[in-house]
Image: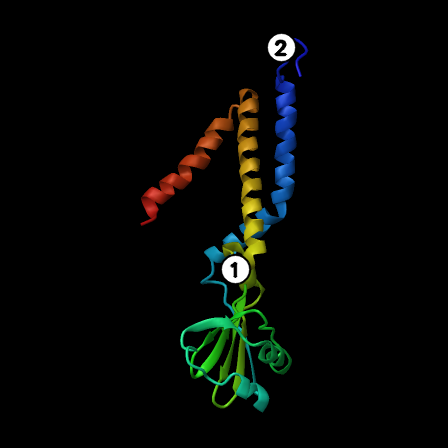
């Protein structure tokens, strides 16, 4: 602080800006690497061949559980988790956890969708025969990373991370811009480069994106 005016000096502003700049860059580093790499893979998705691996399992619902889920009036269009006993049996017989996951109830079947980054799965139970079936598709780690980039089926915790990451990037960018302004006097190439970074994507969008 200036001892005369009681206001921050240029040196104190620089120190604060540098602090926020490096802190935000440290927080955003891993996310920037992830989102930059997956930006490339998404931009070249047609050239990156995926090799999905599909796993299927089948089992028959025990008679007691079959009777417990017998169709009832009002089942059509119902959405809600499977009964605890059936969910526990699915976890053991089909080796997939559906406990607490919403299921689609119809007079003919129970259906549980299990989407996730990089793949998806579903469980279907025939309400008349008790035939239970799982189909699990894994599209690989590139698809997994791409889905994280898009926030697809990644859950609320990942959405919160994306929000925090975006805020860190904003702080990083704004403090970087202010630091550029404060140092621009001794670096004549600063504003031409900044202008190029702004004008180039605008021109590309106007001229080539239709």
Image point (59%, 49%), residue name: 31
Q: Position of residue 23 (x, y in %)?
A: 65, 37
Q: Is residue 200 above or below residue 74?
A: above
Cα distance in 3D space between marks 2 and 1: 53 Å
* Residue picked out by circle 1: 147
Q: Is residue 25 above or below residue 142?
A: above
Quarter holding residue 203: top left
Mark 1 residue element: helix
Mark 2 or 1, closer to the camera: 2
Q: Position of residue 177 (x, y in %)?
A: 53, 30
Mark 2 residue element: loop
Q: Position of residue 14 (x, y in %)?
A: 62, 24
Q: Position of residue 118 (x, y in %)?
A: 54, 65
* Residue picked out by circle 2: 5
Image point (61%, 73%), residue name: 97
Q: Which is more toward the observer, 69 or 26?
A: 69
Image point (65%, 8%), residue name: 4
Quarter holding residue 92: bottom right
């Amino acid at each position: 602080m200036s001892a005369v005016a009681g206001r921050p000096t240029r040196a104190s502003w620089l120190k604060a800006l540098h602090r926020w700049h490096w802190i935000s860059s440290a927080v955003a580093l891993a996310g920037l690497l992830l989102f930059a790499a997956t930006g490339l893979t998404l931009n070249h998705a047609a050239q990156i061949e995926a090799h999905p691996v599909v796993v299927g399992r089948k089992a028959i619902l025990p008679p007691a559980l079959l009777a417990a889920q017998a169709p009832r009036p009002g089942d059509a269009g119902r959405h809600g988790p499977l009964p605890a006993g059936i969910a526990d049996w699915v976890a053991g017989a089909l080796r997939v956890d559906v406990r607490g996951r919403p299921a689609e109830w119809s007079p003919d079947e129970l259906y549980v969708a299990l989407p996730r980054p990089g793949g998806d799965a579903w469980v279907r139970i025939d309400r008349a025969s008790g035939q239970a079936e799982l189909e699990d598709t894994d599209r690989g780690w590139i698809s997994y990373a791409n889905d994280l980039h898009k926030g697809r089926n990644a859950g609320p915790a990942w959405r919160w991370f994306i929000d925090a990451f975006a805020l860190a990037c904003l702080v990083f960018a704004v403090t970087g811009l202010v630091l550029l302004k404060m140092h621009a006097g001794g670096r004549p190439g600063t504003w031409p480069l900044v202008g190029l970074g702004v004008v180039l994507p605008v021109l590309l969008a106007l001229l080539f994106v239709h």
